[in-house]
Image (cartoon, rainbow, N blue to C red):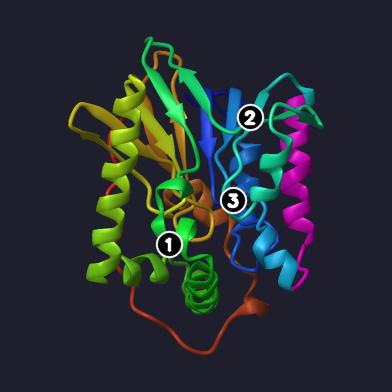
Amino acid sequence: MHGLRGVSRYRTVWISDTHLGTRGCKADYLLDFLKHVEAETIYLVGDIIDGWRLKRSWYWNETQNAVVQEILTKTRAGTKVVYVPGNHDECLRDYTNLFFGGVLVAEEAIHVGADGRRFLVLHGDEFDSVVRYAKWLALLGDWAYTVLLALNGQFNRVRRWLRMPYWSLSAYLKHKVKNAVEFISRFEDAVADEARRRGVDGVICGHIHHPEMRMIDGILYCNDGDWVESCTALVEAFDGRLEIVRWTEAPERIGAMLPSPAEAPAVAFRDEPRAAKPAGV
């Protein structure tokens, strides 16, 4: 997969839940990923721009702007980019089947893999009952999640100073909570059921910020994760094999993202184990 100058070449790349426009967005990791990846097709699987947060308070830094420019540069170089909006960028659902800067906006997509498998590509918020029927509760949860991500940012600034790799405290805590684990399981089952109803081989989604790839009753369920906690993407090799890439676990990336001595904080934390990288499917 790895070509000259450390560039990885794939047939297809899926990313979602970057939440550009928020302080929690790991735009530095995302930009680094985009600069080291080439693909024939890139799917942006929702919540790329966080319209909910931008409505409340404006935040947009140079690195987030560079992410957008890098994506547009890829479209000009011939990469097909498909943007499937999510709930945080739902305003774009009014512009489906239109192109913006070479990027096609689509409500959903059917991706045909190199091996002939067919995948339904959607964000997944339509399978979240809180988002569908109690948006006020979703907004409250979004506020609480923002607080947790702020704590996560402080935690990882300390780890980076200690030359430890990125590790998501917020993801760890979320997946230790029983209700969160049950919600993830119900969501995955519901999305897989929809794929089965559509007669496809698998489904690729985002929304719940939990990278995963597993078989559910004959359907290959793939969630590409996010870029506020996991910093993950789903990629397809030229033979059709799928794999979740965890960008913060690449050794060459870790060294590149270390802070300068001037950024050093005054306290330290003990390192924690990381989840193992799943094999390709």
Please provide percent x and percent y for residue 46.
57, 44
Q: Quadrant of residue 35?
A: top right
In the rendered image, which quarter contains the C terminus?
Answer: top left
Measured in 3D between alpha carbons, the distance from the residue under mark 3 to the one under mark 2, in whole angstroms, is: 13 Å
- Does residue 188 belong to the magenta stretch? no
Q: Hey, what amino acid is under mark 1? A: Val
Query: Label 3: which residue?
Result: 47
Kind of residue indicated by mark 2? Val
N-term mark: 3 or 2: 3
Front residue of 94/3: it is 94
Q: Residue furthest left?
A: 217
- Which residue: 64% across, 49% down? 90
Residue, disc 2: 82
Q: Position of residue 31 (x, y in %)?
A: 66, 47
- Figure check: 267 above or below 275: below
Query: In terms of secondary structure, where does tag 3 sit?
Result: loop
- The residue under label 1 is 130
Residue 246, image x and y in percent?
A: 43, 46
Q: On the picture, is 173 further left or further right than 168?
A: left
Q: Which residues are magenta?
A: 57-75
